[in-house]
Image (cartoon, rainbow, N blue to C red):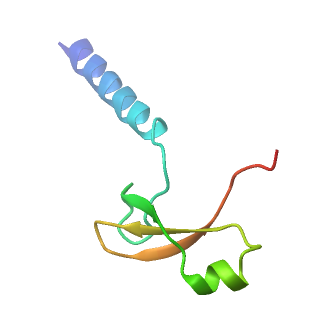
């Protein structure tokens, strides 16, 4: 009986860990959910800050818009 409970606890912990490691994409800093989507940058940023690797995102859960650095490695 106790081994069944221990096995269930181990498998549920492994499933939670697996779900967390398979996450793809940025998290929202306000609501901490993976609901960020890319949107277009403003004309000011495109014209005057074109040399900065900034990407603009919106969270559709809390409606927060934010800029993030592009973390792609240079080839």
Identify which residue, 19 or 5, lies in the foreground.
19
Give above or below for 23 relative to 36. Answer: above
> Which residue is outermost to the right?
75
Percent x, y of residue 33: 36, 58
Identify which residue, 48 or 2, lies in the foreground.
48
Identify which residue, 72 or 20, lies in the foreground.
72
Q: Identify which residue is drawn at 45% across, 42% down.
A: 23
* Quarter-of-image position of residue 61: bottom left
Q: In the displayed structure, does residue 67 sit left or right of residue 23? A: right
Which quadrant is the C terminus positioned in? top right
Give above or below for 40 relative to 35. Answer: below
Q: Identify which residue is drawn at 49% across, 56% down.
A: 26
* Quarter-of-image position of residue 43: bottom right
* Quarter-of-image position of residue 1: top left
Q: How many marks?
A: 0
Percent x, y of residue 41: 54, 75
Percent x, y of residue 9: 29, 26
Q: Identify which residue is drawn at 35% across, 24% down.
A: 10
Q: In the displayed structure, does residue 18 sit left or right of residue 2? A: right
Q: Identify which residue is drawn at 76% across, 49% down.
A: 73
Percent x, y of residue 34: 39, 54
Give above or below for 10 relative to 56. Answer: above
> Which residue is outermost to the left?
1
């Amino acid at each position: 009986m106790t081994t069944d409970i221990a096995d269930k606890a181990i498998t549920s912990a492994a499933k939670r860990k697996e779900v967390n490691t398979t996450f793809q994409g940025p998290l929202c800093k306000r609501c901490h959910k993976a609901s960020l989507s890319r949107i277009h940058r403003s004309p000011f940023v495109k014209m005057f800050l074109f040399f900065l690797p900034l990407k603009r995102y919106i969270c559709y859960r809390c409606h927060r818009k934010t800029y993030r650095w592009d973390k792609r490695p240079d080839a």
